[in-house]
Image: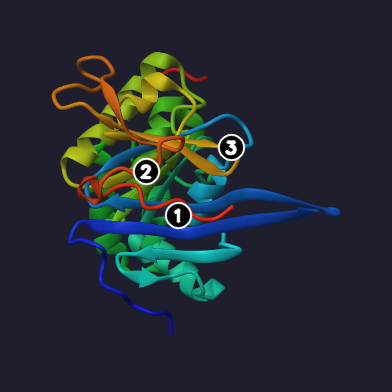
Amino acid sequence: MSAVTSPKNGREIVRLENAWKVYQMGTEDVKALQGVNVMFEKGEFWAIMGPSGSGKSTMMNVLGCLDRLSSGAYYLDGKDVSQLDDDALSDLRLRYLGFIFQSFNLIPQLTVQRNIELPLYYLGWDAVRSGQRATELAEQVGLGDRLGHRPAELSGGQMQRVAIARALTNDPQIIFADEPTGNLDSATGIQIMDVLKKLNEQGKTIITVTHEPDIAAYAQKRLHMIDGNIDRIEEEARGMGAAHGPGFHTLRDAAKGTLSKAEGTALPRGDAKRSA
């Protein structure tokens, strides 16, 4: 049984403590995460950024319980999930997390309704209740008139909206979005980010990976990774953001150490395109 601890504060939802992830490639050890310490709070919108090989995708996979740490601890809403077995992690993802992927990951043979309903099948919902939930979510993302369509009959933007609706079926605590606009043109990407921003305003915690500054500007906080470490964390200046242009100040800079505990975000560092 995994240990349960009280969150550092009442708003904490995710915390990594001295998180290491090491992959073995032949005779070489690749240190994808190197002693990362960070805390995310409920209702925040984060963008994880960094060049290729920086560790941002590894961090997303660990946070989404798609991969395990080599060492260290991962607390999700106060529970250490680092040592959960595959079945327990699968159940956790199904019940508490939502995922949006760059490539949509829709099942081509299924209609929009069936794609949205799929997680509910594994949760044991009956057909009537699942259909009602799928209709509600399709309408929420502007696809109420597309329930009978298949993915091949949709644009890229519409397919990503289906993916967002599917991610919402279990009313997740956190939505993970991995390059959600990567396969979309810029105008459609803005529409998708507007949907995510609205979900965040409704109280959803959003954590996205992106390499695009314009997309990251939608987030309240931006975490920059480099060589498996957190380089810096920036926070949206009050009254700024995507609607007004980017306005961020640095919460934590690795070269300057950790800021005061009152800021409550960065913990001490560990040791060593389709159209709409």
Earlier in the chain: of badge 2 and badge 1, it is 1
Q: Residue furthest bottom?
A: 1
Whether residue 25 sits left or right of residue 104 in the image: it is right
Residue designated by label 3: 54
Residue at point 43%, 53% (across, down): 37
| Local SS, label 3 | loop
Which tag, 2 or 3, sits closer to the chain's start? 3
What percent of the width, then of the height, locates residue 25? 79, 51
> Pointer 2: what residue?
207
Residue 103 coordinates in the image, percent (x, y):
54, 36
Nearer to the camera, 149 or 233: 233
In this view of the protein, can residue 31 be seen by the observer?
yes
From mark 2 to mark 3, how far is it between C-alphas?
17 Å
Give the quarter of the figure containing the C terminus.
top left
The image quarter containing residue 146 is top left
| Rendered location of residue 7, percent (x, y) | 26, 66
Name the residue that disc number 1 marks.
63
Q: Decide: is 103 above or below 157.
A: below
Q: Quadrant of residue 197?
A: top left
Q: Mark 2 touching mark 1, by CB under 8 A?
A: yes
Point out the residue furthest to the left here: 239
Closer to the camera, 201 or 135?
201
Image quarter hosting the N terminus: bottom left
* Amino acid at the residue labelled 1: Leu
Secondary element at tag 2: strand
